[in-house]
Amino acid sequence: MVELKTDAALDAMRVAGRVVADALAAARAAAAPGVRLLELDEVARAVLREAGAESPFLGYRPSFAPTPFPAVLCVSVNDAIVHGIPDTSRLRDGDLVSIDCGALVDGWAGDAALSFTVGTARAEDQRLMDTTRQALEAGIAAAVVGARIGDISHAIGSIGRAAGYGIPRDFGGHGIGRQMHEDPSVPNDGRPHRGFVLRHGLVLAIEPMFLAGGNDAYGEDGDGWTLRTTDASRAAHFEHTVAVTNEGPRVLTTA
């Protein structure tokens, strides 16, 4: 069931979105060669705690997961696509890192992600990140009243395909509100003019994820969470929580 949010609810979600933006910014600032992935999670926890926010990630257990998620950040490094569990591994110069964070404030959720390089970026990694970010911007631009979900999917997918990147078909964006995951789903590839019609008050987490090797296939680590490219190529992931409004798309997860 798709729920449209009131303007007051959008304002409340904006509060949660700012917390997410702050947590991501703090975790990124802390990332450096030698830093453990768990340390990034600790930084994000501190931001949520100071804001009086809860984490929709911590303890989350969807049907596919063998165990509840144990952190407030997903930290996915190099060939990990999404859902990486932060551990004691240390970052190295040149690592491509994707971090995903959520926050719950007064019962409303925000969800966002970004990718970056630790230290010196390889040219191919920079192109991958730039293209994935461009696809996010195109998906946001397509999130207008009267358009359809397929228009967002097509905007994202056409950029990824033109660049020669793979797109994991089973994972994409989603509705968001009182729950982190709500209807409708937002695929990262698809045909325009298809699917649910976008209306004022619909809130979506739009999140392209591209695989550098051009292969759509992915595998799952033994932890039951981390998704990884099958060809060892690198992946990038960007996400914003976006409200569809009569005045145009409203990004809720900026600082």
Image: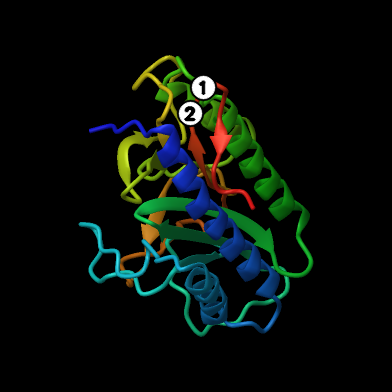
Residue 240 position by quadrant: top right
**Mark 2 highlights which residue?**
244
- Asked whether 189 or 147 is in front, the reply is 147
Residue 112's x, y, as percent?
A: 52, 52
- Asked whether 40 or 218 is in front, the reply is 40
Tell me, what colour scheme is on the image? rainbow
Q: Is residue 183 left or right of residue 203?
A: left
Sequence order check, earlier mark of 2 and 1: 1
From the viewer's perspective, is residue 250 above or below residue 16? above
**Mark 1 highlights which residue?**
144
How many residues crowd around disc 2 within 10 Å: few (fewer than 14), some, or many (20 or more)? many
SS under mark 1: loop
Q: Residue at x 61, y 30 (%)?
A: 138
Residue 141's x, y, as percent?
A: 59, 27
Amino acid type, mark 2? Val
Amino acid type, mark 1? Val
SS under mark 2: loop
Mark 2 and mark 1: span between their CA atoms? 6 Å
Q: Quadrant of the N terminus?
A: top left
The reply to whether callout 2 and callout 1 are in contact (CB within 8 Å) is yes
From the viewer's perspective, is residue 251 above or below residue 179? above
Residue 40's x, y, as percent?
A: 57, 75
From the viewer's perspective, is residue 194 above or below residue 223? above
How many residues crowd around disc 1 within 10 Å: few (fewer than 14), some, or many (20 or more)? many
Q: Is residue 119 left or right of residue 234?
A: right
Q: Is residue 78 visible?
A: no
Q: Residue furthest front?
A: 8
Q: Residue at x 54, y 54 (%)?
A: 113
Q: Is residue 223 visible?
A: yes
Q: Residue at x 37, y 43 (%)?
A: 176
Q: Which mark is residue 98?
A: none
Residue 242's x, y, as percent?
A: 51, 38
